[in-house]
Amino acid sequence: MTKKWYKITFNAELTADDVRAMNKCFYDTMNEAMDIYDLADLELKPNDDDDYEITFSAKLTTDDVKAMNGCFFSAMWEEMGIECYNLEIEKE
């Protein structure tokens, strides 16, 4: 199946420790929890208080996109203890 680059955006309430964890092990978490290995450009932008908009790029198949839509939030919670919302996936 052909992989294409997608831009993934979501929101999460993050503590300072969460931000450090995201910067340190987000890619490893995606590798281990969702078997997604082609990742780039992680960006964490604070909105207000502890709310962040998180963006990254991933090379995905259509099955990967379906899997992300189905279990991304639970994988982030189970692997990193971070509750997420507003997932958007769009082709780059």
Image (tube, rainbow, N blue to C red):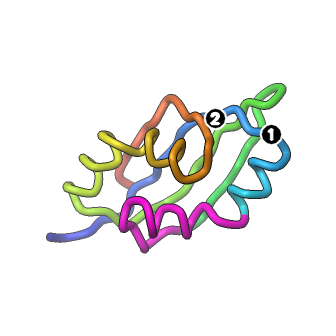
Q: Which span is picked out in magenta?
A: 24-39
74 vs 89, nearest the viewer: 74
Q: Residue at x 71, y 49 (%)?
A: 44
42 vs 30, nearest the viewer: 30
Q: Residue at x 30, y 40 (%)?
A: 70
In the displayed structure image, the side of residue 54 where residue 70 appears, left or right: left
Callout 1 amino acid: Thr
* Secondary structure mostly seen in the magenta stretch: helix
Residue that numbered label 2 is attached to: 12
The label nearer to you, 1 versus 2, is 1
Toward the top, the furthest residue is 48
Q: Residue 76's mark?
A: none
In the displayed structure image, the side of residue 17 where residue 40 appears, left or right: left
Q: Position of residue 64 (x, y in %)?
A: 27, 57
71 vs 42, nearest the viewer: 71
Callout 2 amino acid: Ala
Residue that numbered label 1 is attached to: 15
**16 w.r.t. 56: above or below:** above
Q: Quadrant of the N terminus?
A: bottom left
How crowded is the residue under tag 2: few (<14 C-alpha within 10 Å), some, or many (20+)? Answer: some
Q: Position of residue 2 (x, y in %)?
A: 19, 70
**21 w.r.t. 44: above or below:** below
Q: Position of residue 26 (x, y in %)?
A: 60, 61
